């Protein structure tokens, strides 16, 4: 019979998990998860609001040839956390830009979180006390600024291994 050869197909559905409920890959209360830079104004950063429900502001892109692009340490998607020693957690784009413009001097010091908005603003986010203490240390100069990336223009990458067994020099 033809119908006796029909095979049963069993579909096992994997449980659906919300990626925002996953633990963050980086700790929100670890200073190494943050990047602090000082950039001349205008910085050449395009900020945008994070999509609801998280709120807050992230870096959308960089103006080509702008100070932030030349510096090289910031990335699209970085979460804006502080301007100087002031927390901007949960603020809108206009309020953040106003703080940057109002910062004293020709340069602005900004702090970003190198992780997802859902982690910064979610259950795993930093406590208000930890963040206030961290931003105070940033404004006081106790947190090291991230230096600009070195750009090797027109040179080959360095190779740090001997060219031959008897040669201890390295190629450039």
Image (cartoon, helix red, strand yellow):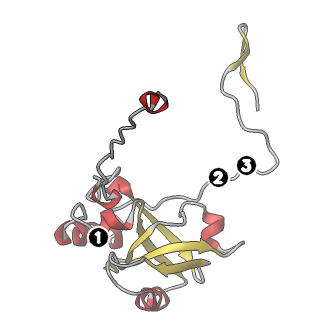
Gap in angstroms between the C-alphas marked 1 and 2: 32 Å
Residue 109: image quadrant is: bottom left
**Residue 155: which numbered mark, if any?**
none
**Callout 3: SS:** loop
Residue 121's tag is 1
Residue drawn at the location 39% of the way across and 62% of the way down: 116
Say which of 13 and 167 sits in front: 13
Determine crowd level at label 3: few under 14, some 14-19, many 20+ residues with C-alpha closer than 10 A.
few
Q: Earlier in the sequence, mark 1 or mark 2?
A: 1
For the residues labelled 1 and 2, say whether their Cβ atoms are less than 8 Å apart.
no
How far from the left and from the top, in percent, is residue 137?
29, 67
Instruction: Look at the picture and state if 54 lies above or below 149.
Output: below
- Compared with 44, 8 (above or below) is above
Q: Position of residue 56 (x, y in %)?
A: 37, 79
Mark whose residue sits in front, 1 or 3: 1
Q: Element under label 2?
A: loop
Mark 1 or mark 3: whose residue is earlier in sequence: 1
Q: Which residue is mark 3?
A: 152
Vertical side of 38 occupied by 32: above or below: above
Q: Residue at label 2? A: 150
Instruction: Please identify, in this view, whether the residue under mark 1 or under mark 2 is nearer the observer.
Output: 1
């Amino acid at each position: 019979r033809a119908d006796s050869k029909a095979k049963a197909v069993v579909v096992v559905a994997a449980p659906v998990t919300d990626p925002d409920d996953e633990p963050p890959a980086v700790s929100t209360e670890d200073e190494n998860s943050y990047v602090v830079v000082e950039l001349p104004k205008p910085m050449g950063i395009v900020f945008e609001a994070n999509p609801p429900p998280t709120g807050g502001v992230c870096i959308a892109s960089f103006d080509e040839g702008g100070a932030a692009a030349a510096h090289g340490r910031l990335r699209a998607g970085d979460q804006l956390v502080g301007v100087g020693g002031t927390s901007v957690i949960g603020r809108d784009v206009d309020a953040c830009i106003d703080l940057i413009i109002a910062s004293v001097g020709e340069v602005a010091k900004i702090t970003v979180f190198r992780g997802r908005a859902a982690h910064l603003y979610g259950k795993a986010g930093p406590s208000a006390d930890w963040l206030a203490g961290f931003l105070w240390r940033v404004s006081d100069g106790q947190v090291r600024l991230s230096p600009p990336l070195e750009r090797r223009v027109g040179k080959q990458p360095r190779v740090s291994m001997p060219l031959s067994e008897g040669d201890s020099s390295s190629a450039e």
